[in-house]
Image: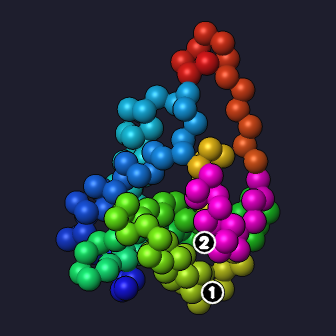
Amino acid sequence: MRVRRYEEADRLALLALAPRLTEGVAPRRAVDSVLSAVTGWVVEALDRSTEPGRLVLVAELDGVVAGFASGEERRHWSGDPELYVGELVVAKPFEGQGVGRALIDALTDHAKQRGLATVTLDTGAANTNARAFYGRLGFDEEDVKLTKWVDGMIGG
């Protein structure tokens, strides 16, 4: 497996993986809106990948894009410097082959080299597979977001 920085030639392959980011989203969310949002996240990550403090890493297996992850250096609300993982996606045929772990390891190495205190990310409460995966890699659940659905409103 090879993990490297994003190149423009990867764009279509990475955009094709964006729908995987809809998995585990609360079922009351509108599928089309969620897909539009996650695709926008990926486009922004790719478009801004050369800016200082930002990176997109691509994992390849046998020359095929197997997954990608984006990272952004920022400050946690407490003031601690962190590397925030915006997206991490593994193509379905490559699940269970160490792709996600390799991407997290590469992001963690980057954070260490940059002197950042933590690597953080968000995932949906309903995304039990992702939560278990991140837990196995040493991530602790730190914050909890609560949502109340208002009857009669969109999604409610």
Of helix, strand and loop, which one carries label 1? helix
Crowd around label 2: few <14 · some 14–19 · many ≥20 (10 Å): many
Toward the top, the furthest residue is 152
Q: Is residue 89 visible?
A: yes
SS of the residue at dot 2?
strand
Task: Report x, y in % for residue 29.
Answer: 52, 30
What residue span does the magenta drawing correspond to?
128-143
Q: Label for residue 83?
A: 2
**Residue 107 in sight:** no
In the picture shown, does residue 84 fall above or below 32?
below
Q: Residue at x 61, y 65 (%)?
A: 133
Q: Quadrant of residue 117?
A: bottom right
Is-magenta flag for residue 85?
no
Q: Amino acid at mark 1?
A: Lys
Q: Position of residue 58 (x, y in %)?
A: 36, 75
Position of residue 127 relative to residue 95, above or below, is: above
**Farthest-out residue, bottom:** 113
Mark sitting earlier along the chain (2/1): 2
Mark 1 burial class by Cα count in 10 Å: few <14, some 14-19, many 20+: some
Q: Quadrant for the C terminus, please.
A: top right
Q: Which residue is mark 1?
A: 112
Left/right placement of residue 78 relative to residue 152 reads right
Kind of residue at disc 2:
Leu
Q: Quadrant of residue 74?
A: bottom right
Of the pair 64 and 114, the residue shown nearer to us? 64
Residue at position x 72%, y 43% in the image: 145
Say whether marks 2 and 1 touch (CB < 8 Å).
Answer: no
Q: Nearer the viewer, residue 61 or 56?
A: 61
Location of the N terminus (image quadrant) = bottom left
Distance from Cα at disc 2 to Cα at disc 1: 9 Å
